[in-house]
Amino acid sequence: MKEKRTWEKILFLIRPYKLYVLCSLLCALLSVTASLLIPVFTGNVIDTFAEGAAAHGDRDHYLLILGVVAVIAAAAQYIMAAFNNRVTYRVCRDMRDKVSRKMHRLPLAFLDNHPTGDLVSRMVADVDTFADGLLMGFTQLFSGVITIVAILGIMLYLNTLIALTVLILTPLSILVARFIASATHKFFEAQAAIRGEQTAMINELVEGQRVVKAFGLEEEKLAEFDEVNDKLQQVAMKATFFSSLTNPSTRLVNNIVYAVITLIGAFFTVSGGITIGQLSVFLNYASQYAKPFNEISSVVTELQNAISCAERIFDILEETDQVPEKDPAISPECKGEVELDHVAFRYVPDRPLIRELNLKVKPGERVAIVGPTGCGKTTIINLLMRFYDVDSGEIRVDGADIRDMTRPDLRGRYGMVLQDTWLCTGTVRENIAYGKPDATEEEIIEAAKAAHADSFIRRLPKGYDTMITGGGGNLSAGQRQLLCIARAMLCLPMMLILDEATSSIDTRTEMKIQSAFAKMMKGRTSFIVAHRLSTIREADVILVMKDGSIIEQGNHEELLAAGGFYANLYNSQFVTVQS
């Protein structure tokens, strides 16, 4: 049932290219027709040799026609292949485009819960496998089916008894191929899933190679990889073995058909019912009749693999999109006012994280969020940016519920610098201007200077034109973070989010950055998440979080004077150990 639905979805993708498919079918018909005429004229040529010199003129005539028909068959085959390639690779292009667009519509919860390598495997390897199966289906299935039908028609016309014999034995080949194909589908399905798991593991190992080496875990990780690799090998072997039975099984049935035709044809020839040339025609047709079954059996095997991969792709396409935008959406004037009203949220249904969170931030205020790991600091950032929607309560920006605003409008009001730096493949200049592609050279350099990144950028091989590859693997962690800070300083929206924005920067540079941040945050609403409490002493309001709730609130001096959780946290970082 699932396979049938998958086929319906594939046909829906092919529908825009139905004209190409029709042209391919016509070319297949022409190619098959021309190919099937070749044995007829070959038989005629053989009969002219049997008739002797008197038939010399007819022989030349048949040879000329034979040559023309062969050229037509080859040309039609070439044009059919061109149409098939166009349909196949356009369908695959559309499929990748749909998956790519879907990725941008999926909630972050889906992306957080699925390994990156598995998603990459679906978009790349699975689509390629699907393309191979689809192309083989177009190329061989069309011409194979037409060949079978046409040969049966011709054989019925030439000799009904021989044709009926072939027709009676034909279902055996089809039943054998169908039985084996249905049995192999589950193996191809498992193969595609394990291949995605393996790709995810490879992606993880490549990204974390430094950590693996630092802890001396090479052998353990190799053992884990070998385990997955062995699983893939076993499933792939089973899929290949059982699918490979299709071809020899159908060949056996087809050889039986060929032998029966030969015996019956020989009997008719001896009795004078048909000529030797006509017998050669029948034997040619018997051979051509068997060939499409062998090809179709191979096609069925490839299609089973392709269907398994297509199902994994459609699984992504059928995932539930993020909550749609309100229509019409509202866009209040950007002032920088933020309010959290009885907000509750949980990542896992049975594990509450944030309960009844209330907060009101005035325009231009600097709000610092501190607390132990896992208390919900970064979760608040995710909710403010609407990467996740609240379970209950409201978050209002400039007086409007953020669910009534479009996500681009909401996120355009914030500038973000995160602890996890992300740089795209491109030049240093392009990465700084990522959020403002139309920025001038002067603006980019000014932002880099404000982030204290200009000096190290100019020391790079090509300065601002230096290519950044592998997510910034050719830069240090501190340099990557400085570029992300420069990116935020270039945009300068009304609200800022700094989530451990200086965690990878040395203390001296951090002091300079803090000074730059102070200028940048002046008059702008700012949310600062930090573990190093020295970076937040100038904040207007410090929120102390524990277990998803705000347990203390005030400025630095007020919280120290209170002698509560914040005071203990602060003193634990700056206490002097007496010897």
Image: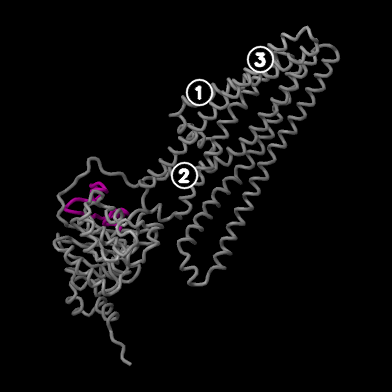
* Mark 3 surroundings within 10 Å by alpha-carbon count, few (fewer than 14), some (14 through 19), many (20 or more): few
Q: Can residue 162 be seen in this view?
A: yes
User: Is mark 2 in CB contact (under 8 Å) with mark 1?
Assistant: no
Q: Is residue 416 left or right of residue 107?
A: left
Mark 2: which secondary structure?
helix
Q: Earlier in the sequence, mark 1 or mark 3?
A: 1
Residue 392 at x, y = what percent?
28, 55
**Which residue sits at x=53%, y=55%?**
198
**Does residue 284 belong to the magenta stretch?**
no
Residue 220 at x, y = what percent?
56, 67
Q: Name the residue under label 2.
A: 315
Q: Mark 1 points at which residue?
A: 23
Q: Real-space Cα distance between discs 1 and 3?
A: 28 Å
User: Is mark 1 in CB contact (under 8 Å) with mark 3?
Assistant: no
Q: Earlier in the sequence, mark 2 or mark 1?
A: 1
Quadrant where the image shows the C terminus: bottom left
Residue lying at the far top in this picture: please name it: 54
Between 500 and 93, the residue placed more toward the observer is 93
**Which residue sits at x=49%, y=49%?**
121
Identify the amino acid type marked 3.
Answer: Leu
